[in-house]
Structure formats: structure tokens, C-alpha cells
Amino acid sequence: MTTLDPEQVKRWRLILGAASEERLQQAVGDAAGQALLDGEGALMDDALAAIYDGTSGASGSDSGSSNTGPARSRTAGLGASSPKLAKWLGDVRSFFPPDIVSVIQADAVERKGLTQLLFEPELLSQVKPDIGMVATLLTLKGQIPERTKETARKLVREVVDDIVKRLAQDLTRAVTGALNRRQHSPLPSSTGLDWTTTIRKNLKHYDAERKLLIPEKVYFFDRARRSKEWTVILDIDQSGSMANSVIYASIAGSIFASLPSLDTHVVAFDTEVVDLSEQCADDPVDMLFGIQLGGGTDINKSITYCESFITEPRKTIFLLISDLYEGGNRTEMIRRLRDMHESGVKTICLLALADDGVPSYDEDVAKKLAQFGIPCFGCSPDKLPELIEGALKGVDLQRLAERTGT
């Protein structure tokens, strides 16, 4: 007989819920029917039961149920009570690591409809800020009461600041590095040393006896940035399935807008087109609150609008962030993208710009675009700098997709 580890049994009890209590007691040979969980374990169980126990509901009974008995039936709900919700939030944040807290919070809203988390300032201030919660806030922003809006903005700003901190340095380095490796500067910089040019132009100074190259002049790349050297257009699908991608793409657009070497345009669309370029340059939080997640999709209409920004095709990057489910003229959309690509525009379709992989997308459209040389792939935010740098340097887009795609 294999001896069961009591800690493992407790973990399974937490995972499987109250319905498993009796079976697990039998498995460990507990004839007395003593509860498997007590103390902190019981509190963790109640916190999970409020969201995941099939017997509980959003308006269930009080969570302080008894911890004794052979098959403790949990009916822990969160109800409409703010104190109860506040205690639940505190318990969740105390007992679980941050990544799990994010999942539980999201499930609280999706599975139980607990929008009270977002509508009361005291409760919202206790919510762990993460991109999923920001997406939920933006989806429900029209319903958020006035008294909660400032707290909501603070939560969004905290997430935005974290993402900017995560991406800004690498994106800036990628852009400036790609654009400045064409000119040389008299200013020395170890990171900007052009080894190829330095060696080539000093070969005549090679000392054969000592087998040393003694350079007469050392060449460095110019770190100065020329104004509006490239145009970058982000065309962002606002459909609900693209929520995380919308947030990451919008913030990336605000970082591009801060770089004087880029002429940046950020456009969001459903069945209508919204130009967010001004807000993008000012405050990414304002820009995000200008986005309306959900609704229909007219990709062709947005591409038509974006075409007006293209003045030098070979100095333009067009990023379509979309799952390619077209509610408008699909044939025309594909033709426009093909024409854009053939004119010399670096045309890329990101099926997702998110940490959690590629969502459902229109595979037929993606295959047709790929046949024209337009790569369609998912990309994590951390890979975006490499993608942009490669596009600016003229790297083959299909190879770039293979290297940076998910």
C-alpha cells in the first residue's frame, strides 16, 4: 500500500472542492470523518469556493461556515456585501501568489459577474492591477460610476507604467540602433564602435611582424537621431477577443510616438475608425480610455484610412493587430494589404500582441496574406523590439516572423 502524503491530500482537497471531502477522507483512512482542512487551509478553501464551487452563487450565504463534519457543504458566496467582498479580496491576496490572484480576480468578474469589484472605490483599490483587469475595466468603462473613475484611472496608470518600464528601453534602443547604423560620428562610444569599417579602412596599417592591426582612425556609429525618418502605423482591432493586444499595442504606440525619428500613427477600429495619434503622444492612459472594446469589425475601412499616412512606402511600417475576422469587404481588405506590401511598405499582421499566445483567427485570410509575403503571426510584447528593429534594417519579413513569432 502506498502511503498518501497528507499535504498532497490537502492540495487535492483545495483543487477538487467540497464534493471530494468524503472520498479523500476514505482514501486516507479517516474513519472519524475529521475535516481535511482547518485554519488557513479552510480560509483558502472558502476564498476559492466563492468563485469555483458549483454549489455557491454570487448571492450565496455567509462564508463563515462550519469547518467540521464529514462533508462540509460550501455555499460561500460573495453576495452584494462590500465588507464580504473586501474580506475576500484580502484573503485571496494573502494566500495566493500574484499570478494566481490575477486569474482568480478575472474569474470573479467573468464567472460570478462580480462587477462590484470595479464599481466601488474601496474595493477597486484592493484589486491587484494587471492587464486582464485593465481590459475588463475598459470593457465596462461606460458603466463605472463617477465616484470610482479616479480609482480606475490609478489602477490603469499603474499597469501602463509597468508596461512602459518593461518595453520602453528596449524599443527605443531597437529603433535608434537600427536607424543610426548608417552614419558615422567622431564621438567615441564603445557601444557604437563600427568594427567592420574600422578594420577595412585600416588594413594598410597592419603590422605583419607583430601580427597587429594598428588603426590610424577608429569609426563609430552616429547616435544622433534624425527627425521623422520612418513612419510607423499601428492599426488596432478593438474586438473583445483582442483586449490584451489592444492594450499592449496602444502603449507600444505611445512609446514610438515619443521617438523623434518616427512619425507615429495609432488607429483603433471596430465598424468605425478612431485616430488616437494625438492622445497617444500625450498620455497613454487617456488613449486607452478612448478605446471601446467589443463591437463589429471593418478592417478594410481602417486600412483605407491608414493609407493616407503613407507618403514614402519604403520608409513605412504598417502593423495590423487583428485576428483577421472581417465583417466588411474581405476581398477588398486582402487586395489593399497586398497592394500596400507590393508598394514597399513593411506590412505585418500581428494576430496577437500578448503574453498568452495566439487567439482564434481567420486562417484562410492569414494563409492568403502569407502567400503574398505578408507574415501573420502572434508576437509577445518582449519580442516586439526585435521585430521592429528587423523591419527597420530590412530583414526578410518571413524570416523575421519565424524568429519572433509565437
Image (spheres, rainbow, N blue to C red):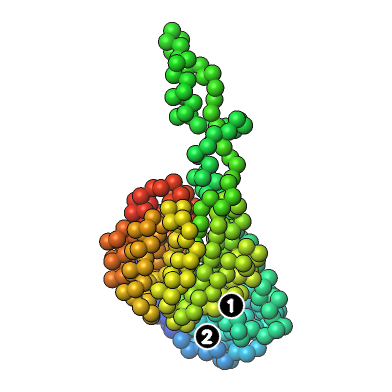
Q: Amino acid at mark 2?
A: Lys
Q: Quickly name the residue at label 2.
A: 112
Q: Quadrant of the N terminus?
A: bottom left
Tell me the residue that label 1 is attached to: 137
Secondary structure at badge 1 equals: helix
Residue drawn at (57%, 82%) of the image = 140
User: Which residue occupies 33% across, 69% down?
Assistant: 334
Mark pair 2, 1: CA separation: 16 Å
Give me the residue at 58% from left, 33% from top. Answer: 185
Question: How far across and down, in percent of the image, does residue 305 sit?
Answer: 47, 71
Res. 196 mark? none
Is residue 212 visible from the viewing direction of this image? Answer: no
Q: Is residue 18 above or below residue 285?
A: below
Q: Which of the marked residues, 2 or 1, is nearer the chain's N terminus?
A: 2
In the foreground, 185 or 43: 185
Q: As shown in the figure, which amino acid type bears the numbered disc 1?
A: Leu
Judged from the image, the secondary structure of the residue bearing numbered disc 2 is: helix
Counting from the top left corner in percent of width and height, residue 242 is at 46, 72
Residue at the image position 59 percent from the left and 77 percent from the top: 137
Residue 386 in percent (x, y) is at 46, 50
